[in-house]
Image (spheres, rainbow, N blue to C red):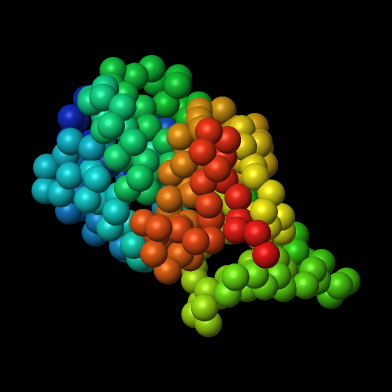
Amino acid sequence: MATTVLVVEDEAHIRDLVCLHMRLEGYECVPVGDGRQALQIAGGQKLDLIVLDLMIPGLDGLTVCRAIRREGQNRDVPILILTARREEADKVLGLESGADDYLAKPFSVRELVARAHALLRRVRRATEAAAEPAAGAAAGAPPTISVHGVEVDPARRTVRVRGRDVELTNQEFNLLLLLVEHPGIVFSRAALLSRIWKGDTFVTERSVDTLVKRLRHKVEADPASPALILTQWGVGYKLADV
């Protein structure tokens, strides 16, 4: 099936330019000019990538991003935000809202296409990794790991926290699995980048912080005061020791 990209951009010439190059790459492009219509489309069809401008009418891009991440069939779809804002705080806010990457305007179309390729590659690798344990389950699946009230089943890629099922994205699951397999061991941000993103370009150590924050919101009793995934200041992160 064709790779489907939703392009949410209110400036018609930018929207048309992005869609032109996406189609040249063999992707199917769905162009949208406002946030409300973007949410309607995201709720009605499966997407492979969303290119999302922050400054759009109807609903702003941050609101759209948060709404997509909360529920629905596209909650795990990679999101690349476009922004005319150059302040670091605005970029961080976009990442913390659930975006996977950002690109500041004016941008190079070649860089946009390269970042889109990188995000889609990341999803394909995660999907393949998720299929490997299931395929090998009959040959002896790895045991469920239980620590601090968290149960992680590597074969089924499921997680239970204090008796309730928790849905994680592929990256969130991979991060949690790595940490629960090595309680008390500190991983630097650089080490987590290499293990979770596996050499992808266009990701930075800020991406690690954003992923940790999202995971804490799903597994910690109090994300503002984490007791499970701990920060080792100046180094990185670890799972609380057993």
Q: Position of residue 141 (x, y in %)?
A: 81, 71
**Quadrant of the image containing the C terminus:** bottom right
Residue furthest to the left in view is 58
Q: Residue at x 69, y 49 (%)?
A: 185
**Can the viewer see residue 16 in this picture?**
no
Q: Residue at x 29, y 40 (%)?
A: 93
Q: Position of residue 103 (x, y in %)?
A: 36, 27
Image mark count = 0
Q: Is residue 220 left or right of residue 50?
A: right
Q: Nearer the viewer, residue 218 or 242?
A: 242
Q: Nearer the viewer, residue 72 or 10?
A: 72
Q: Position of residue 197 (x, y in %)?
A: 60, 40
Q: Residue at x 43, y 50 (%)?
A: 213
Q: Residue at x 86, y 72 (%)?
A: 140
Q: Is residue 113 left or right of residue 192?
A: left
Residue furthest to the bottom in view is 163
| In this view, 18 is above or below 95 | above
Q: Nearer the viewer, residue 22 or 93?
A: 93
Quadrant of residue 150 in the image? bottom right
Quadrant of residue 90 in the image? top left
